[in-house]
Image (cartoon, helix red, strand yellow):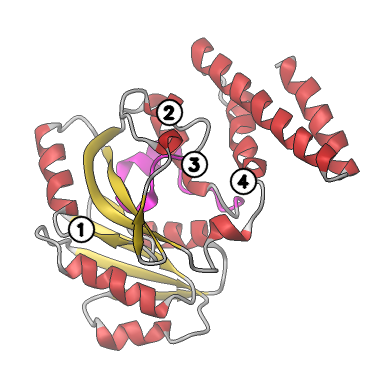
């Protein structure tokens, strides 16, 4: 299997070095490593000299979805793995996923379990984020259980479901994984094969409050745009969408955000009737 690794990055020069080194330490070597620099103003461009075999692409700051899509369009390999520049792979990450796909040739996307590191210390992963690996679509409706850095998929998937939605500033991974798992098998390789780091200020999950504000966009798209949606999945999506809007309404009322209160009330009325 030929695998391309796509790394989007923005002003994470030191962390990016660690991420790339974890790729070179893999027991199964990828065919390509592509770094898409999304308009960094630090020393990220030094990567070109330090890792000459890495393909470095610079673009004007356009967001992580744009950077990932730019990388996807640049690969030659049939399989693509993602690695966020603040994460790290265990040495057998690619090897274990390759073994899985060689045994299950009809499955074109897999993801793995992970270790969480905060301020240099391994931390307990909350129960709600536990990966079960049975009904992937249902398991990811509430929040995203699939870390981009854990994913390996076949590039043909993008022809079937589209690429990362560049309109989404965050939760773009939640959006794409749901679109894929709606009609395609996604498998869990149940091993901790990546390290997810937290505690640094530029994490997108820390930058934006109320992540459900972005997840509801995806759920609305399913109800409005997907004509052939299975009735059971439509019911699940509608239930989760209304739950999220109820929580957002509660928060808006608490913080006296009158405009948001009006919006969320209108949304609840609208989607109860869909």
Give SS at disc 4: loop
Give SS at disc 2: helix
In the picture, measured across the screen, residue 155 lies left or right of residue 22, that is: right
Earlier residue among tags 2 and 3: 2
Quickly name the residue at label 3.
174
Earlier residue among tags 3 and 4: 3
Residue displayed at 57% across by 20% down: 227
Give SS at disc 1: loop
Distance of mark 2 from mark 4, alpha carbons?
17 Å
Asked whether disc 2 touches disc 4, contact meaning CB atoms under 8 Å apart, the reply is no
Q: Which residues are magenta?
A: 144-168
Distance of mark 3 from mark 4, alpha carbons?
11 Å
* Picture coordinates of residue 193, whole percent (x, y): 23, 51
Q: Looking at the figure, which quarter contains the C terminus?
A: top right
Is residue 158 within the magenta segment?
A: yes
Q: Which mark is residue 211?
A: 4
- Asked if one can make out residue 244 in the rendered structure from this viewpoint, the answer is yes
Establish if 247 lies above or below 223.
below
Quickly name the residue at label 2.
139
Q: Nearer the viewer, residue 109 or 201?
A: 201
Q: Nearer the viewer, residue 143 or 164?
A: 143
Q: Dot 2, crowdedness within 10 Å: few (<14), some or many (≥20)?
A: some
Residue displayed at 56% across by 71% down: 61
Quickly name the residue at label 1.
90
Residue displayed at 63% across by 40% down: 212
Distance of mark 3 from mark 1, alpha carbons?
23 Å
């Amino acid at each position: 299997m030929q695998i391309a690794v796509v790394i989007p990055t923005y002003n994470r020069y030191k962390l990016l070095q660690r991420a790339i080194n974890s790729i070179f330490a893999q027991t199964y070597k990828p065919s390509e490593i592509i770094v898409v620099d999304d308009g960094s103003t630090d020393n990220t461009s030094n990567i070109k000299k330090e890792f000459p075999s890495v393909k470095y692409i610079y673009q004007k700051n356009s967001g992580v979805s744009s950077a990932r899509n730019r990388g996807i369009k640049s690969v030659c390999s049939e399989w693509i793995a993602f690695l966020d520049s603040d994460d790290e792979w265990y040495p057998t990450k690619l090897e274990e996923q390759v073994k899985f796909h060689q045994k299950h040739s009809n499955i074109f996307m897999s993801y793995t379990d992970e270790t969480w590191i905060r301020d240099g210390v391994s931390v307990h992963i909350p129960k709600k984020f536990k990966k079960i690996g049975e009904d992937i679509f249902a398991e990811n409706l509430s929040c995203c259980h699939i870390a981009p850095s854990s994913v390996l998929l076949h590039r043909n998937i993008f022809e079937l479901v589209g690429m990362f939605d560049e309109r989404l500033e965050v939760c773009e991974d939640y959006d794409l994984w749901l679109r894929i798992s709606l009609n395609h098998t996604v498998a869990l390789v149940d091993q901790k094969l990546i390290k997810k780091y937290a505690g640094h200020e530029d994490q997108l999950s820390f930058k934006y409050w109320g992540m459900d504000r972005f997840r509801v966009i995806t759920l609305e798209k399913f109800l409005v745009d997907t004509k052939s949606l299975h009735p059971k999945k439509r019911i699940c999506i509608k239930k989760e969408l209304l739950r999220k809007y109820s929580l957002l309404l509660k928060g808006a009322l608490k913080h006296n955000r009158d405009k948001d209160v009006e919006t969320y009330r209108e949304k609840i009325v609208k989607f109860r009737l869909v």
